[in-house]
Amino acid sequence: MKAHTVACPGILLSGIGVADPAAGNPDGLAGVVFAGGRIVEAEGDGVLLLFLDHAGTEGGSWLLRAAHPDVYWDEMVAAEFLPDLGDRRAAVKRIRARHPHLPPEGWTALASGDDPFHQGGHWELGILSEGHAVEVRRWPVPADLPLVISVECRGGEAKACKPAALAADRAAVRMARVAKAAREGKRVPR
């Protein structure tokens, strides 16, 4: 399995830096391959991930949870366009009831600890199984950084994304199709 570091805000870096490769393999790992002072792979399926501190602000915090499906993010983006604040809050409450925050599936935590570079910061090392995804949720939300990033394992590769941004892109494409159909007097596509 390949090894990656997930830096804030969801930047995927190849390998995991190790202070002392001579110290041996991290607990729970076999067949660890080091290159340039970094763990680059280990035996097993999935991907080895080191999540560095994602708080983004002093006093902030973050957690790993199961990734929500695209429909959750699509509904959350649609709720943002409701004109009435009370309606928006009620819609978000209904969406969260249908899609609760759950512990991450397919995630095997190997180690965690305090980040020596960020006061109050935290890191977590683990294995993400093939076909699974986790989300990092941060609070409070730092300016110009995403609230949530998602990391998934597909084909033995790690892929990171910003699910709310992808949902906004899908909404823009749908709105463009609807506008085009309306201009042409055609039935609105779903």
Image (tube, rainbow, N blue to C red):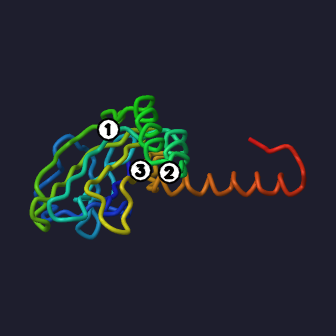
Instruction: Tell me the element at label 2.
Output: helix
Which mark is on residue 107? 1
If you read the primary sequence from the N terminus, does the residue marked by circle 3 or circle 1 appear first? 1
Mark 2 and mark 1 in contact (Cβ < 8 Å)?
A: no
If you read the primary sequence from the N terminus, does the residue marked by circle 2 or circle 3 appear first? 2
The residue identified by callout 2 is 80
Which three-letter amino acid code belongs to the residue tagged 3? Ser
Which three-letter amino acid code belongs to the residue tagged 1? Trp
The residue identified by callout 3 is 150
Mark 3 and mark 2 in contact (Cβ < 8 Å)?
A: no
Q: Locate residue 31, reporting x and y percent.
A: 28, 47
Which label sits in the foreground, 1 or 2? Answer: 2
State the residue lying farthest toward the right: 185
If you read the primary sequence from the N terminus, does the residue marked by circle 1 or circle 2 appear first? 2
Please give left or right for residue 132 compared with residue 175 in the image.
left
Structural crowding at the residue carrying mark 1, measured as other residues with C-alpha within 10 Å and reported as few (<14), some (14–19) or many (≥20):
many
Between the C-alphas of marks 2 and 3, the distance is: 20 Å
Instruction: Tell me the element at label 1.
Output: strand
Please give left or right for residue 13 compared with residue 139 in the image.
right
Q: Is residue 110 above or below residue 22?
A: above
The answer to whether residue 38 is seen in the rendering is: yes
The answer to whether residue 130 is seen in the rendering is: no
Instruction: Tell me the element at label 3.
Output: strand
Which three-letter amino acid code belongs to the residue tagged 2? Glu
Q: Locate residue 179, reporting x and y percent.
A: 77, 56
Identify the residue at horizontal 23%, vertical 44% (top origin). Answer: 29
